[in-house]
Image: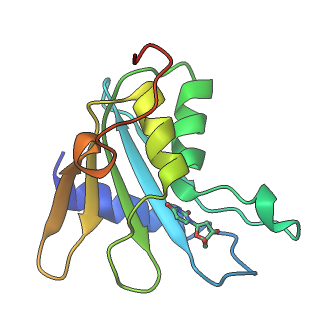
Amino acid sequence: MTKQYLIEQAKEGMKQAYAPYSGFRVGAALLTGDGSVYLGCNIENASYGAAVCAERTAIFKAVSDGKREFEAIAVVCSNGTPAWPCGICLQVMAEFCPDIQIYLEGEQEVQVYSLQDLLPNAFRLSAE
Ligand code: THU
């Protein structure tokens, strides 16, 4: 599966974004260890703090489906800039998939980061 294909899948996920408050639409596509792809979108709420990001939607869908191994997550957003995952989403990735690759849409090509790049000292209960 190509990086560009996973980006295109994230754009599919973004079609379901529910973002009437921010107007900032986000989509994610999560590739699992067994080759499945889970799509996610951001889902906002009139009580703003109840919003959930696209990345966590995709990860929680997969985890609740019994998946525990993740290869990569592609993230796109509606304003044409790289869709950097927020700190909470990075922390959720650290819980389930510390070795995940993160694909963001660049101007020319897909940008690839490791979770270690974006969250080098993730909180873990075992870390002392
Ligand atoms: N958002 C995401 O979906 N992913 C992120 O990593 C950052 C932010 C969403 C949440 C909210 O619906 C909107 O973007 C504006 O913050």
Q: Position of residue 18 (x, y in %)?
A: 70, 70
User: Left of 92 or right of it: where is 74?
Assistant: left
Instruction: Give me the residue at 32% from left, 64% from top.
Output: 8
Q: Residue furthest right?
A: 47
Q: Position of residue 85 (x, y in %)?
A: 43, 58
| Residue 73 visible here | yes
Q: Nearer the viewer, residue 121 or 55?
A: 121
Q: Is residue 11 above or below residue 73?
A: below
Q: Nearer the viewer, residue 46 or 65?
A: 46
Ligand 1 resides in the quarter of the picture at bottom right
Q: Residue furthest front?
A: 128
Q: Quadrant of the C terminus?
A: top left
Q: Nearer the viewer, residue 97 or 66?
A: 97
| Residue 39 visible here | no
Q: Quadrant of the N terminus?
A: top left
**Number of marks present in the image shown:** 0
User: Left of 63 or right of it: where is 30?
Assistant: left
Q: Is residue 96 above or below residue 101?
A: above
Q: Quadrant of residue 4?
A: bottom left
Q: Which of the colour schemes (rainbow, by chain, secondary structure, one colour) is used?
A: rainbow
Instruction: Give me the residue at 78% from left, 60% from top.
Output: 49
Q: Position of residue 94 (x, y in %)?
A: 41, 33
Instruction: Give me the residue at 22% from left, 48% from top.
Output: 117
Q: Is residue 98 above or below residue 53?
A: above
Q: Nearer the viewer, residue 13 or 93?
A: 93
Instruction: Give me the residue at 80% from left, 57% from top.
Output: 50
Q: Is residue 64 above or below residue 60?
A: above
User: Left of 76 or right of it: where is 1?
Assistant: left
Q: Position of residue 52 (x, y in %)?
A: 67, 55
